[in-house]
Amino acid sequence: MKFAFCGTILVLTYVMMLIFTYGMRITYEKKIMEQKMNSVQNQCNILANQIVNNNYFMKDSVHTLDSEIEQLASIFSGRIMVVDDKFQIQKDTYTLDQGKYMLGGNVIKAMEGEDIRRYFKKEQYLEIITPITNNTTGEEVGVIICTASTQDVDNVMAHVKSRNKVLYLIFFIVCSIVAIWLSNLLTKQLKVFVEAIHRIADGHMDETIKLKGYTEIKDMADAFNEILNKLNTLENSRQEFVSNVSHELKTPITSIKVLADSLLAQEDAPAEMYREFMEDIVDEIDRENDIINDLLSLVKMDKKASDLNIETINVNELLELLLKRLRPLAAKRNIEIVYESFRPVNAEIDKVKLSLAFSNLIENAIKYNKDDGWVRVSLNADHKFFYVKVTDSGIGIPEDCQDQVFERFYRVDKARSRETGGTGLGLSITRNAILMHKGAIKVHSKEGEGTTFTVRLPLTYVV
């Protein structure tokens, strides 16, 4: 990246330098050529005045200006022709066309009082055609055609080009030094960033990346640190989950072993004791089976959403069926279950997974309730979502525990959870099922007054 950045700076700088110097050279060449033309034009104007003042076109006049014309042509390294009002060439410093007639278009224009200026870059000469005006009558009495070499201008421009090459070299060296310095400065923090990533990749997950420099680099480091924190949180959660799974699976087995060893240690244990211990063993086996089933359900919920079996279901009928199954559980503690349906709701859902999710919410509302309490389940919908709310009059959840109730194996009251037979996986299964449907679940609770779980799910499932 450093070499690419450095190369880019050099190329852009060199291109801009070429464009700038080319523009300056063209401007300078135009300016110096304009000065050259003005100089020749002035000399031609002076010569035109002298021709009029000395009656150069009079037949009996002595051509005293011939030597001056020759000298001026020599100074210009060119050619001067003097043409009278009959378009006859009276003077030609080359003597090639003297006495002949000149009827070119530009000569005619000049005879009408127009100054003609032309530059022939490739042939390296310029041409000035100046009218000769009688100051008394204001009439044009002839024209001067002057061609002057531009070799001196070309020599100056060649010298400028050679000087430019030296400037190019100096400028390129300076720009190279600046580009290398800038590329090192800008990529220094990136190098530190890459080294930090390599250290993290080697297993140093507890480190964070601290960078100084530009805002974009700091933002990049902050974003990576945020990702790293999430990965660490996920890893801690995974380790805690494995530890909890091991503990939860081991606890019933330990209890079974203790019970079995107690029976084996008593050779003449009465039948009533055997029966009591065997009932306890069966309970522990059932508990182990519940944990395993919940773990399998959780694993299924962790799979991709493509595993959903989406179909259009009447949610009203689904909730009524679930409540019918759970009413006997509530009746044992004289807990009243109230169901409110505000409108018919048909939604695209996975019936099995959401049945498990809603069952967990309602069953928890019964388990963690007070005797002679109540549970209210309501169903409502709008044009886009449907809402299921489960409210109870139970023991409630402490405020500092409400953000953790959806974590695997988390229990607010471990002793009470043991009594009710909970595995600590129900709410985690519920949340995963709802998230797979692109929904959301929220909890609101006040300790000692009850808990409300609100579920929002889309009516139409969108992949």
Image (tube, rainbow, N blue to C red):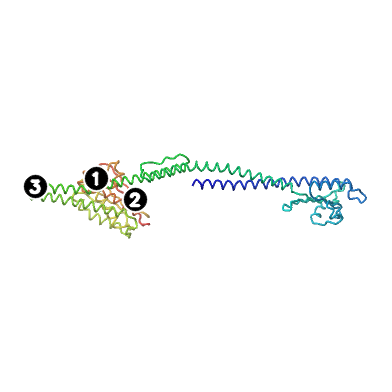
| Disc nearest the viewer among 1 and 2 | 2
Percent x, y of residue 172? 59, 44
Q: Nearer the viewer, residue 123 or 371?
A: 123
348 vs 13: above or below: below
Considering only order in the chain, which callout, 2 or 1, is on the residue closer to the N terminus?
A: 1
Q: Nearer the viewer, residue 392 or 62?
A: 62
Give the side of residue 146 with respect to residue 341, left or right.
right
C-alpha gap between disc 2 and disc 3:
55 Å
Residue 385 falls in which quadrant of the image? bottom left
Q: Position of residue 112 (x, y in %)?
A: 82, 53
Q: Amino acid at mark 3?
A: Gln
* Residue 70 numbered mark, or none: none
Place residue 325 in its image quadrant: bottom left
Amino acid type of disc 2? Answer: Ala
Q: Looking at the image, is mark 3 or mark 1 nearer the viewer?
A: 3
Earlier sequence position, callout 2 versus callout 3:
3
Instruction: Give x and y (percent) for residue 99.
Output: 87, 55
Q: Left or right? Give the position of 200 relative to 321.
A: right
Q: Are marks 3 and 1 in contact (CB under 8 Å)?
A: no
Q: Secondary structure at mark 2?
A: strand
- For mark 3, give the secondary structure: loop
Report the residue marked by disc 3. 266
Marking on residue 440 = 2
Q: Is residue 208 visible?
A: yes
Per the image, the residue denoted by label 1 is: 394
- Residue 51 seen: no
